[in-house]
Image (cartoon, helix red, strand yellow):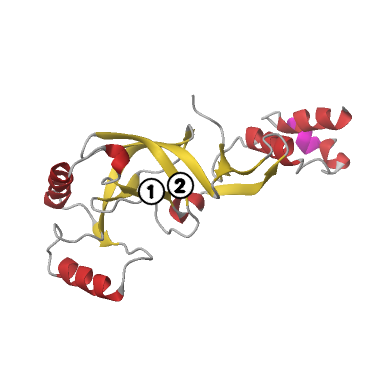
Amino acid sequence: MKNNFLIAQLYKNCFFVDLSTSLDVHKIEINSIAKIDTGCGFTSIHLFNRRFLLGKEDITRLKKEAINLNLKAGLSFGVSDTDDIKKHEEMLFKSGNLLECKCINFKHNISKFLLNGYDIEKSSIRVSYNRQNNILIGMDVLQLFDFHCGYSRVLDNYIFIGVLRTQEDKSDYYKALEEHFGILSNINEDFLNSEAVKIEASGFFAWLKNKHKN
């Protein structure tokens, strides 16, 4: 079932989400856990992760396929990569020895991208064939959102809740903000009785107005 906004609960000091996507080139369906990471610039999938049960021969075959198809490639370094590793990887990349390059990722087209059942407007993703880290949801995705983090009075836990900025009907998101945080309880009564509210199509302000009466 598709959701109309994204919500995630804090677990072990991280926001984890269920990711559902597919890599068009490899025809691989991915349904796995991913971590929201505001310190990560770009969302990336690491196919050597143990969750995918892919052996070294499988990884090598898929990486060769990406190279032969001339997919756009770039280097991506982690916090544990030393200066010597970076220099070595840059040398391999510049010389065109992409198969031996461990810090390389490739841009893949995708036909869907859902987080906890919420459909994200994303057509491509970066894929690494050698790293074994968690799948990270980076700022390239998060910048598409209006989101709020806080303690939910409903779930009794710290939560992330967000909606795509381009989504026309955000009423379910606004309702969730009110239900979890009481964030809209002090909205001006004059506004709720204004002409703009009367012609508002989503029904959200009518719902909020009724809530104020109760």
Secondary structure state at the residue bearing disc 2: strand
- Residue 198 part of the magenta segment: yes
Label 1 Cα crowd, 10 Å radius (few <14 / some 14-19 / many 20+): some
Q: Is residue 168 left or right of residue 198?
A: left
| Residue 180 appears left or right of 76 | right
Tell me the residue that label 2 is attached to: 35
Residue at 82% across, 37% down: 192
Q: Is residue 55 above or below residue 210?
A: below
The magenta segment is 194-199
Name the foreground residue: 100 vs 41: 100
Give the quadrant of residue 23. Answer: top left
Q: In front: 40, or 56?
A: 56
Q: CA distance from mark 1 to mark 2?
A: 7 Å
Quadrant location of the C terminus in the rendered image: top right
Lateral position of residue 26 relative to residue 13, left or right:
left
Residue 89: x %, y % from top left: 21, 68
User: Residue at label 1?
Assistant: 134
Callout 1–callout 2 Cβ contact below 8 Å:
yes
